[in-house]
Image (spheres, helix red, strand yellow):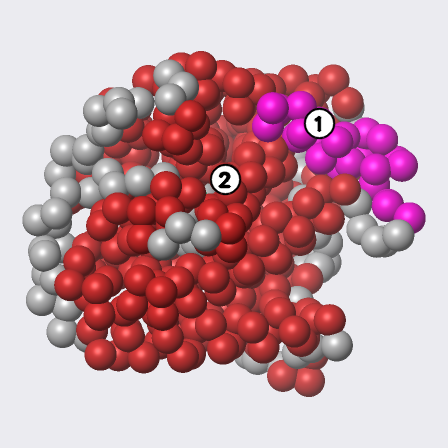
């Protein structure tokens, strides 16, 4: 077996894992899903999901990864072989490729918008103007494919270079700067006229709007945002040294990720309402709001492109983790070289991503699928970005709670930390997380 890489330090792990977690899921998907699901009530359900469902699953994935030192398929097999568990590992590997395929479309948009801002496309703006620009941008098929390909190729290139060399270094610099600009834009958004109505929408829960769909959206968003349910955190945990404090590192990743998502909401909704735009407008929401946050501030023509550049980098640290899962599987399980695995699997993700790239306006037939009444992108996001992750998280919880046994996981975690909350965690991972995931999944079929 090839020599496995290791993170160089605990902070290196936290940066890489939060680099995986923090991305478009926080800045683009969270506000767009919250907007489409009525605001405040969704936000509360999201926070509840993070705390009682996702955080326990995070510890489960990290401990399983570090214990087995394996990719998801190998990790399950190392503890208990069997078709079901192997199947869950495979599902994770496939889900990684699928999420990479459509996530890279939006990541490509951040690159496109960076260039558009540099070219001065947003010097003067109106809500109708930004919407029209977004529409013509997404309607251009070649541009969409080009941006998708560009993004996946960069991801391939970094993953091909290996774990701590590529992933760790690229996370170290950009996270703090991104946070800084995010805060600047939040302040700008809060000082716009009519910002208060956005805050009200964002923070005041209206439970009359909550349906089974809202609840599953909130839970799925928690998994997506924390990169859980497909073994990405398991894979990252497998590169973690035994003496590191896993409980502490995992908790920091969750805290940081949640703070960034909440800040993104404070950036988007005040500006949306101040411009009289629709909070439920869907996938373009972030791209249509950002211009209003930088055009009229001093240095705006510098902060605008910088924001999109940093967003592209945040997306990159996430796409790296998606590709790393199938690549580590091919390396560990099939004996492929890292380069070969990265290029071939990345290439497949690129091809699979093309319909998603074209479904946002370029090819009308993909924009409204007959059976589902959503576009191809939305369907992929629902199937892979939500359902598959929820199913995966359910089985990971069951596996760690009952097959491997939570007691063994606690032993693993305690190699580097006291983990005083072990009894609480054991209870959550055995009873609460799996039961809630199952109930919520059943809820959408009823
Ligand atoms: N969590 C990332 C984000 O919020 C996306 C992501 C990276 C992801 N790796 C993943 C989502 C693995 C699910 C599974 O942008």
Q: Position of residue 168 (x, y in %)?
A: 26, 31
User: Which label was assigned to residue 93?
Assistant: 2
Which residue is at 31% across, 47% downward? 78
Please state, as top left, top right, bottom left or bottom right, where the N terminus lies in the image: top left
Residue 243 seen in this snapshot: yes
Q: Which mark's residue is nearer the viewer, 2 or 1?
A: 2
Please state, as top left, top right, bottom left or bottom right, where the C terminus lies in the image: bottom right
User: On the image, numbered disc 1 is attached to which residue?
Assistant: 354
Q: Position of residue 159 (x, y in %)?
A: 38, 24
Which residue is at 36% across, 70% downward? 402
The residue furthest front is: 82
Residue 117 seen in this snapshot: no
Which residue is at 45% across, 20% downward? 341
Q: State left or right for residue 62 relative to residue 383.
A: left
Q: State left or right for residue 43 relative to residue 139.
A: left
> Where 244 sits versus 112, above or below?
below
Q: Position of residue 330 (x, y in %)?
A: 43, 27
Q: Secondary structure at mark 1?
A: helix
Which residue is at 28% across, 75% downward? 426
Q: Mark 2–mark 1 contact, CB under 8 Å?
A: no
Tell whether position 369 is magenta.
Answer: yes
Task: Name the dominant secondary structure of the magenta segment.
Answer: helix
Q: Tell me if the residue at label 2 has its CB under 8 Å from ligand 1.
A: no
Q: Nearer the viewer, residue 297 or 287?
A: 287
> Where 357 sits versus 24, above or below?
above
Q: Nearer the viewer, residue 268 or 22?
A: 22
Q: Which residues are magenta?
A: 348-370
Q: Secondary structure at mark 2?
A: helix
């Amino acid at each position: 077996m090839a020599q496995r890489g290791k993170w160089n330090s605990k902070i290196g792990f936290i940066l890489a894992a939060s680099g995986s977690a923090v991305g478009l899921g926080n800045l683009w998907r969270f506000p767009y899903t919250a907007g489409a699901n009525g605001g405040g009530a969704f936000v509360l359900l999201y926070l509840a999901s993070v705390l009682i469902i996702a955080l326990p699953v995070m510890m489960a994935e990290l401990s399983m990864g570090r214990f087995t030192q394996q990719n998801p398929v190998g990790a399950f097999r190392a503890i208990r072989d069997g078709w079901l568990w192997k199947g869950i590992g495979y599902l994770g590997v496939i889900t990684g490729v699928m999420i990479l395929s459509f996530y890279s479309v939006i990541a490509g948009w951040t690159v496109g918008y960076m260039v558009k801002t540099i070219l001065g496309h947003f010097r003067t703006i109106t809500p109708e103007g930004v919407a029209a620009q977004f529409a013509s941008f997404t309607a251009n098929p070649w541009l969409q494919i080009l941006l998708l390909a560009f993004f996946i190729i960069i991801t391939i290139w970094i993953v091909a270079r290996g774990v701590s060399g590529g992933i760790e270094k690229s996370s170290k610099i950009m996270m703090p700067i991104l946070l800084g600009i995010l805060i600047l834009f939040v302040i700008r958004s809060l000082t716009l006229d009519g910002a208060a109505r956005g805050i009200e929408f964002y923070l005041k829960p209206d439970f009359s709007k909550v349906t089974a769909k809202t609840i599953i959206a909130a839970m799925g968003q928690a998994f997506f945002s924390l990169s859980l349910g497909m073994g990405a955190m398991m894979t990252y945990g497998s590169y973690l040294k035994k003496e590191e404090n896993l409980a502490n590192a995992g908790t920091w990743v969750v805290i940081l990720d949640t703070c960034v998502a909440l800040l993104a909401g404070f950036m988007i909704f005040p500006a949306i309402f101040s411009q009289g735009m629709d909070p439920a407008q869907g996938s373009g929401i972030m791209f249509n709001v950002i211009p209003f946050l930088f055009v009229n501030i001093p240095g705006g023509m510098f902060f605008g492109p910088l924001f999109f550049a940093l967003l592209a980098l945040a997306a990159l640290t996430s796409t790296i983790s998606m590709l790393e899962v199938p690549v580590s599987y091919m390396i560990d399980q099939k004996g492929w070289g890292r380069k070969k695995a990265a290029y071939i699997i990345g290439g497949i993700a690129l091809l699979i991503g093309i319909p998603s790239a074209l479904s946002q306006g370029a090819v009308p037939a993909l924009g409204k699928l007959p059976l589902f009444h959503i576009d191809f992108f939305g369907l992929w996001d629902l199937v892979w970005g939500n359902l598959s992750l929820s199913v995966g998280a359910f089985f990971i919880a069951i596996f760690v709670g009952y097959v491997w046994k939570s007691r063994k996981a606690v032993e693993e975690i305690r190699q580097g930390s006291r983990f005083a909350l072990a009894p609480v965690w054991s209870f959550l991972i055995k009873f609460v997380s799996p039961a809630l995931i199952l109930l919520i999944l059943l809820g959408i079929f009823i």
